[in-house]
Amino acid sequence: MKNLLTIALLFFLFAACESQKKEVVKDIPIAENIAVAPEKKVPFVWDGANIYFLLTDRFNNGNPENDINFERTDSTGVLRGFMGGDLQGITQKIEEGYFSDLGINAIWFTPVVEQIHGATNEGTGNTYGYHGYWTKDWTTLDPNFGTKENLRELVETAHGKGIRILMDVVLNHTGPVTPKDPVWPKEWVITDPTCQFTTYENTTNCTLVDNLPDILTASNSAVELPDALLAKWKKEGRLSAELDELQLFFDRTGYPRAPRFYIIKWLTDYIHELGIDGFRVDTVKHVNENAWAELYKEASYAFETWKKKHPNTILDDNPFYMVGEVYNYGISGGREFDFGDKKVNYFDNGFHSLINFELKNDADNDYETIFTKYSKLLHTSLKDKSVVNYLTSHDDGQPFDQERKQPMRTANVLLLTPGASQVYYGDETARSLVIDSTQGDATLRSYMNWEELDSLPGKKDILAHWQKVGQFRNNHPAIGAGKHKRLGKTPYVFSRAYTDGDYKDKVVVGLDLPKGKKSLWVKGFFGDGTKLFDTYSQTEVVVANGKVLLDNDFDIALLELMP
């Protein structure tokens, strides 16, 4: 009996304490820290995707045994040779949770098909096809990057983590001509003139640069396969299989055996076999736009066929996704790109998104100017389409903050601007973009700075900030795909809201906040008594008098609804 009385007394005291806690929270909306953020089912939305872009050869070396192939042993210019990164290295980082910790939900890596075997020398020292854009054979992978089984493992591992895979594809050109790599037949390519970029014609029917043979993508004339390719397949023991597959493709589609349709077949094979989720398409404006509509048609067919064959491994109902690199396209151009003498709507030719080259110029503006502009354009002229924003990349010689002096602001601008985001490998670790003795794009393509995370002060703090903001973005489609509204000017507070059928997502973000106690105005968006969670400081708060109060030294708040 005595024990029962003791238990009853303890229960009464516990209940009283809990009641007192609730009263304190109700009166003073600054609550004690809690360990974890609320969990909830979040749909994946390409319009708000958080895409990680990496050079396959420069990210992580998962298999040192494949570092040298095809006698690619000549000395090269600085950062112009293979350095060992491969598909297995990417898979390792997926397994370790590196991408998940960053809030990444899609990975785009440079092309991994077989590259030219030789090197070029255009005054920059020898250069090999380490970057993946100099194709020799679209039907197989380059052993420097790995095998098709390595690619299959990467896709399956990524899908297991809820991460989509974007393959980088090239239809515009072959690789350069070298002593080891003969030019493709004249029925397949042209080798001159070099593009002038002043009209539609001299941007599409030309070679991008000298010694980069241009595929005759505008031709509908049937062509035979190159003898060199046939000999290669025969030597590798797969000639019959490749020819049989081509016959089935052309029988099914009725397309003429023109150059672009061969390549479209070869590119979409990776979707048929592996369930690739999307393509990032290279050099879009240098190809007649109808070719992209044809690529998308066949890619979508392949994706839907793959899903029917693998009903238990489908991630969701999203259709196949294509984002295009129309060099110098900016979001202000809306749905059209202006060649000077002709305007082209690539969004009507297979692309859901285009890479936006404009954000790097907007990034020095105040947050509200950036966010309002992008939200307005995406919900008016670009309604039902999107853009992929970036601040640094592999071939933009004028990136934002090239000296990496503002890594936190870079994260805030990139990850909180409406649209999809493209994190370039090393943005999150402030990898240097200024490398001594490099020429051209090479300075942007150094090896991922893994060792600096442990050796240089401040790198882990930078990474932690990118992780927190990235995870918030991943958990809330409203950030990239929702509508923006400013709630408070000083301190700066804004809301984002996204609705798709029965799914609704609402968040509030504060930036440039003062240290210590701060009041964030949320009136009109979250009502009094609403429980919110600041994922940045891991703090629960309650709305009172149209605002929430926080007390910490962070200059950012990321507020979401408690369940």
Image (spheres, helix red, strand yellow):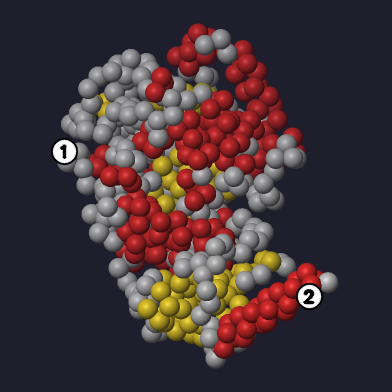
Amino acid type shown at disc 1: Ser
**Is residue 398 something that shows in the picture?**
no
The image quadrant of residue 276 is top right
Whole-percent x, y for residue 10 in the image? 71, 74
Residue type at numbered disc 2: Leu
61 horizontally vs 159: left or right:
left
For image coordinates 65% across by 51% down, the residue present is: 318
Q: Decide which of 230, 106 is in the foreground and name it.
A: 106
Screen quadrant of the N terminus: bottom right
Judge the density around disc 1: few (<14), some (14-19), many (≥20) Cα neighbours within 10 Å: few
Residue 14 left/right relative to 457: right
| Residue under the image location 46 percent in, 68 percent down | 537
Residue 91 position within the rendered picture, expressed as x and y whole percent measured from the top left? 51, 35
Q: Position of residue 193 (x, y in %)?
A: 31, 35
How would you rate the neighbour count of disc 2 (Cα within 10 Å): few for under 14, some for 14-19, many for 20 or more?
A: few
Quarter occupied by the C terminus: bottom right
**Residue beneath label 1, please?**
437
Quickly name the residue at label 2.
5
SS label for mark 1: loop
Q: Position of residue 422 (x, y in %)?
A: 44, 53
